[in-house]
Amino acid sequence: MSSSNLRRLQQLTSQLNVNPCSDTVIDPKKSIQDERLNPSFPIQELTDYINGGAENSRLKKMVMEQLERDPLWKVDDYPNLSLEELRVRVFKKVKSLVSYFMNEPLPMFYLRFEVVNLVDPGFYTRVGVHYGLFVSNLQSQATPNQFAYWLEQGALNMQGMFGCFAMTELGHGSNVQGVETTATLDLDTDEFVIHTPTLTATKWWIGGAAHTATHAVVFAQLIVKGKNHGVKSFVVPLRDPKDFSLKIGVTIGDCGKKMGRDGIDNGYIQFSHVRIPRSYLLMKYTKVDSEGNVTKPPLDQVGYGALMNGRVSMVRDGAIFAFKALTIALRYAAVRRQFSSTPDQPETKLLDYPIHQHRLIPLLAKAFALRFTANEVKAIYENLLEVIDQAKSPESLKAAMNVMKEAHATSAGLKAFSTWECLDIIERCRQACGGHGYSSYTGLANMYQDFAVQCTWEGDNTILTLQLGRYLIQSYLNRNKGELPPGIQYLNLLSSPEKMKSTCKSNNVDDLINLNTLVQAWDLACASCARDAGEAYQKAVNQGQTPEQAFEFASVERLRAAKIHTNGYTIKQFAQSLQNAPKSLQPILTRLAQLHAVNTTVEFSGELLQVGYFNPEQMSIIRDQVKTLCTEIRKDVIPLVDSFGFSDYVVNSPLGRYDGDVYTAYFDLVQRNNPPVHPPPYFESLIKPLLQNKSENAEIINMEID
Amino acid sequence: MSSSNLRRLQQLTSQLNVNPCSDTVIDPKKSIQDERLNPSFPIQELTDYINGGAENSRLKKMVMEQLERDPLWKVDDYPNLSLEELRVRVFKKVKSLVSYFMNEPLPMFYLRFEVVNLVDPGFYTRVGVHYGLFVSNLQSQATPNQFAYWLEQGALNMQGMFGCFAMTELGHGSNVQGVETTATLDLDTDEFVIHTPTLTATKWWIGGAAHTATHAVVFAQLIVKGKNHGVKSFVVPLRDPKDFSLKIGVTIGDCGKKMGRDGIDNGYIQFSHVRIPRSYLLMKYTKVDSEGNVTKPPLDQVGYGALMNGRVSMVRDGAIFAFKALTIALRYAAVRRQFSSTPDQPETKLLDYPIHQHRLIPLLAKAFALRFTANEVKAIYENLLEVIDQAKSPESLKAAMNVMKEAHATSAGLKAFSTWECLDIIERCRQACGGHGYSSYTGLANMYQDFAVQCTWEGDNTILTLQLGRYLIQSYLNRNKGELPPGIQYLNLLSSPEKMKSTCKSNNVDDLINLNTLVQAWDLACASCARDAGEAYQKAVNQGQTPEQAFEFASVERLRAAKIHTNGYTIKQFAQSLQNAPKSLQPILTRLAQLHAVNTTVEFSGELLQVGYFNPEQMSIIRDQVKTLCTEIRKDVIPLVDSFGFSDYVVNSPLGRYDGDVYTAYFDLVQRNNPPVHPPPYFESLIKPLLQNKSENAEIINMEID
């Protein structure tokens, strides 16, 4: 064999042997193992505390295993599926879930749903529109007899019926009262005629409409004897479940590709004089009889209390998706190395860079704050349901309305806060993974795309924040009439000019980052911003504007007051939740609560300096403590992430693997999803002609004139 | 015909007739026409000023027309193309661009590229890796003879050669000096052996590698006679242009789906002892002869000056994509209506809500600031190229290095700033379009996905910002040695404790929002933050840390100093650019510059209050002015957006149409891309069995035991 042939042989065989790591590179698995050697707290206890008990942890683990082992639930090939393939895949899973639903208790079903949401948000929405919107709406808006009827028709178990929720129109989103679709009573036939009078009245974005739904709850203007009685909801059959033919007068189309969540088939619906029996109007509150008499109960808005459910669970969603994103970015940061401080030494872990700690650890603290805040919001909601349930007399109805106002404002503001913060955390985590964060196989790009809609649906975040701001202005104006709810007792400070001018007396670090100190500072900032908003409102009213105009005039101040309120709220909730935490978790949770409070204080240092409780020097000290607290929490970062208790299947990102073997897993996943094709299919038809285009272009250039 | 049959007939025929708008809804086209009735400035003059002259405006318009009329350049069906289809479509367009390139002058080519980038960022990158990275690198790193050789081989016109740029590895991104790929000189054969020693050394994310490239510029450790001479670049043939077979020892795969830009085929490459002639090392600076003698020139880093090009153009990219995003969100806001203040009146335009103005108009001002800042960065870069070109003596080389340091720091910091701000603007615009912003057919979701990578490539934004921060610390330490470059003359303030303590004496609104006042405040904040960073660094050095460790220790302060610096820089650049603007544009541009300055001041009110130039009361007045300035600019918003001069084809969003006919266009586009299919293809196989699952589940429930 000639020496050059031998060399070639060596070259070829050497291809078979690519070492996983060079000598100066530390095995990524060891990098992450090291992080788990000495946690300062019992990890499982934190898992159980987050999950609300050891039993919940056990059940969640069970659900994760069931999903992981079910071949239908494979999700790591999602990026390469087309829109159609994805929709089919998602639908295939619906049936298995229905079986679970029929055979297990409700709390278990909710846990399952929480996990399913983390794994496949498109699936979650696809089933969610049926249960969370369609059935929920029947439950809260139908009379008991009506509800029983629809259950008998199969609503609960998707038997012959898959529901969707047709509220939004092409031209109407947030202003539900402005929808253009009409429901006109035809006294001759005792039917309602559902009609789409214009293009902008087309029902749009209706989840499940494009491919799946047989029935819709439709929001339309109730018109009886020429009089408009406002927007009510109606059940309208869309398709025959036997052959899926469209009902007469129903036009349905496909909204197509979205930024994310393509597993749910959003569609549009136009009704052309579609007739339904009168009894398909959901009549728990407003009733219409066959003579065309319309009766409205007092305070029918109470019925909408139940619909808060979606927002309440979205506060929690923000926390758990933040957990998932942080699992990926922080585990990767414990493995990824970059630059070495001394030549020939292993490179430094990203997580050991102060700047990387500063990028991610405050977000970890914020995610915990969101998680504990979500518990509080859930408790407020559950209390509300009880109050509504017991409200029969006009007085108790009125009292229920007050509870509802607070619950609505709180959940609205926190839904907006939690989803905005979570989206921001996902994006920061994505960017913290460098180039690999841009890949569709590492989990964060898709998580962003799937999650982004949460800032818009179930109430646009800006509008929801403004609604909280409106409540703050109203509470400011009424602050001296009766006791204030716990969340806004800071308004009492405004009665004492002295208290509003109080300042922090200590320059001692421990005093400054004490949670009581920080909560006091935030109470002052919240009170001050609420007053600013209230004063802007009053100024407008004094100038002769209507209340509505005045609220608009004060909208910038309203938004600011609401944002400061929600930030302060999370600081307080985190501090309060410490009191119930097991002793063993107190030190680490206290550090996290402090970091969250300190970091948020720095983020809003303008507002806090403005209120004057801290002076610039104190603020400098507080600012430095972000760094210090990050350093203190640093060693527990991976144990904290482990405490979220997500299996690798749920994390669904090679960068976020528990064992740290990120490069092998990432390479393998990308290769499996994109088997190399040589040459590419368009080589002969397109690439080759381009590469051989010499003569053609040369001709143009060399052509001489005359 | 029976009456019920007649009714049915009416129903059926009525489907054919859906009115575009109801009576109380105002025609969207009129809504936007009204906005153009009375602009306060000459729109075309602003267009020309943005474009750098009327001739450029004319040429851009020409390019937009050429693209729009070329069937190959259809882009409104992109959301529904698969990864493969998109790659084919994009490649088809390459050839037509090469023909333009060979037949038109370079400035025209650049203009064309700017428009092409706006229309199809994936295409831009696909061609960009060849010209902007592969050929650019040859140009800056090859000797004249080498460069001539590669041009002769077809590098310039893609004749037999399509280049890619193989720098990044699976395990190495920002730390280029740490790449693991080796290039070992074989003295026996006068060849370099290019080798991938580990999995993490796999070249990763290489644009064009998966499907297109025949050659790569490869970054590898130069090893001669057992000694490592650091990372150099080599030309390595990858595929035979005739049949696209892989060269011996070359393994190529596909990185697959990404968050966006799927038109560019990123791939991975492994080299297994691949041999190339010694002369394929690019030897403009470091030379290796056949005896294995390695000669290095002094200050070879100067060669990398030319590579700043990418970052410089990305500062402009940030501005123009922000323009595009704002065109969509603001035109939509002039058409979309929501809630009416009085019953039976048309609903109010989003753009007339103070909160919506507050969401978007400051972003409009920021985009202008970015655009004018980009001009300055370009001028700095062009000056640098000239200095490098003329630097022959060691002294002038050293002087060139100083110019380069400043240019590098400025462009690095502003690349990060501009891309972060633009991404944020895109997302805010997307959310401001409500639910329709989540559709893939309205332009903003995809714009976000395509643009997001700009925060990572050509230097991770955090690392680039830290590099600017390092420069600021160095400049702080050396501030008394020689004159400071214009961008950081604020450091001179630190020599005068009195100046650092100066305060604003006036509470008058006009004084407070005067650009000189605001620039002064920002100079103080910049100086103060640079000092904080410098002091943190010095503290670490005094404690015995090495300079590198001290820079790490001070990284949080460095990042902050750099962020304040870039924000202040844009305020100053906008103020300065006013002086060159035509008289007719001065009033509107001054308003925008003020809004940008005031809004940024409020955003960083913590930093500004900390430095003490403004007191809390003054800050409150400034804060209110954001609202006031938005109101003042409100009436010119649509004329301002029109001045960007994008055709509907370039905007590529029904929501951003010039004529305001958004609903019809949106509905039509969605329908065209998703022709309804009834029933869905998986009805018989999947949906029907689910809907008929009654018996099966009932069986489970009813089964009795015993």
Image: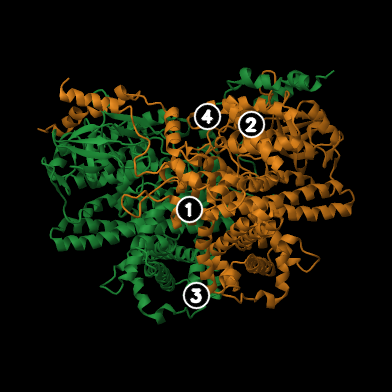
Chain colours: A green, B orange
Marking on residue B83: 4
Label 4: how many Cα within 10 Å (few below 14, some 14–19, many 20+):
some
What kind of residue is marked 1?
Answer: Ile
Q: In the image, are marks 4 and 1 on the same chain?
A: no
- Left/right placement of residue B60 relative to residue B672 reads right
Residue B496 placement (x, y as % from top left): 72, 75
| Residue B467 in sight | no
What kind of residue is marked 3?
Answer: Phe
SS of the residue under disc 4: helix
The residue labelled by disc 3 is A614
Marking on residue A71: none
Chain letter of disc 3?
A
Q: In the image, are marks 2 and 4 on the same chain?
A: yes
Which is nearer the N-term, disc 1 or disc 3? 3
Residue at 30% from the left image edge and 26% from the top image edge: B686
Q: Toward which corner of the image does residue A671 lie, by quadrant?
A: top right
Q: Residue furthest front?
A: B37
In the picture, which quadrant includes the C terminus of chain B?
top left
Residue A685 placement (x, y as % from top left): 62, 18
Label 1: how many Cα within 10 Å (few below 14, some 14–19, many 20+):
many
